[in-house]
Image (spheres, rainbow, N blue to C red):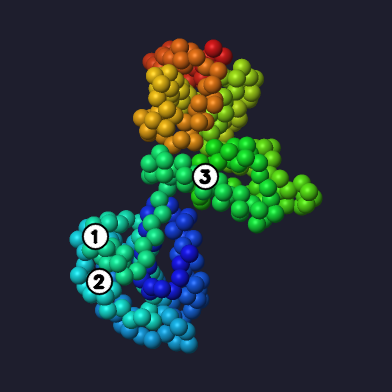
Amino acid sequence: MADKSTNIYLICGDEEFLKLEKKNRLLRLYGAEESINFNEFSGRDQDISELRDLADTLPFMQEHRVILLSDTGLFKGASDERFEEFLRELNSTTVLIFFESETDATNKLFKLVKEKGEVSKFIKTDSMSYKEAEAEQLKIGERVKKYLKEEEREISGKNLNNLLMLTGYDLFNIHNELEKLICYTEGRESSDREIKEEDIEAVCSKTVSDRVFDMLSAKLSGNTKKAFKLYEEMLSVRTAPMKILFMLERQFNQVYILKELLSSGISEGEAAKKMEIQPWLLRKLRDQSRNLRKADARRYLERSIELEEKVKTGDIEDRIAVELLLIE
């Protein structure tokens, strides 16, 4: 939680949702929203003289003047000595907030902000190590449950897992889907405020990748009818059969590699690292192919490659190639 023990802040990283949350929290903390003591600048080549004049101007009827600087590029590459001097001499009544996409911890200005102020770096789980990602994903799960509780909703562990497997761990995506679920379940009796599997299925957006995954899961579980239903749904929204075939091939490849790695005796964590995928995706692939033998995974992969080649040479239509793969 931010406090007023400093007046220089750097918000950075690739997790935009948390960055925006932090920025808005700071703006509220200093009463900057709709204040005449708030100035915002964006982009490179900032006018240091103008910034100095603003920073030296006492706030009007408030404790602080707030200056927000976004995507300046000051924290990447060689440091600007003029800004170093500016920060060292900053008026105590002026709050400076940097909101950056790219930073370098060896940059002198970065080090100066870390020394004199507060650096908040937020990164996506995709950019973390396996252990860090696992810990962060647990935090995200708790965050979802807390948010739903504040909205007088509940979700079981199983359905939370279903939701996060669908959304991934992108917080913007998660919160968009949560808002849809909350609206969808509005008006229910207070005793029936649980987010159910059918609610998630009804309102949460699915990418082509999600739909292909569901289609393959249906096939591998022996539910060919459902697999074809999902295939027809994708065709109805003009998803190219060749794209579906390519994605099926890629997924069979992932399943085969996973089977190969796990059969060699390594842990799921090591397998995720070798495959360069997140733990949640590995678990999803593992569960999907639980009843599939390694030999069958290899056979499906080879068949999908064969059918793709036949489509490319004109021996078969792409739509029929997918149908054959689903039937076999």
In the picture provided, is 8 more to the left or to the right than 251?
left
The answer to which of marks 3 and 1 sits earlier in the sequence is: 1
* Location of mark 1 (residue): 107
Q: Position of residue 141 (x, y in %)?
A: 55, 46
Provide the secondary structure element on which disc 2 rests: helix
Depth check: give the residue in front, 5 or 41.
Answer: 5
Q: Position of residue 159 (x, y in %)?
A: 63, 39
The answer to which of marks 3 and 2 sits earlier in the sequence is: 2
What is the count of numbered marks?
A: 3
Q: Position of residue 308 (x, y in %)?
A: 42, 18
Provide the secondary structure element on which disc 3 rests: helix
* Location of mark 3 (residue): 138
Q: Is residue 36 above or below residue 267?
A: below
Depth check: give the residue in front, 261 or 212.
Answer: 261
* Location of mark 2 (residue): 83
The answer to which of marks 1 and 2 sits earlier in the sequence is: 2
| Cα separation between marks 3 and 1 | 32 Å
Say if mark 1 contacts mark 2, CB within 8 Å: no
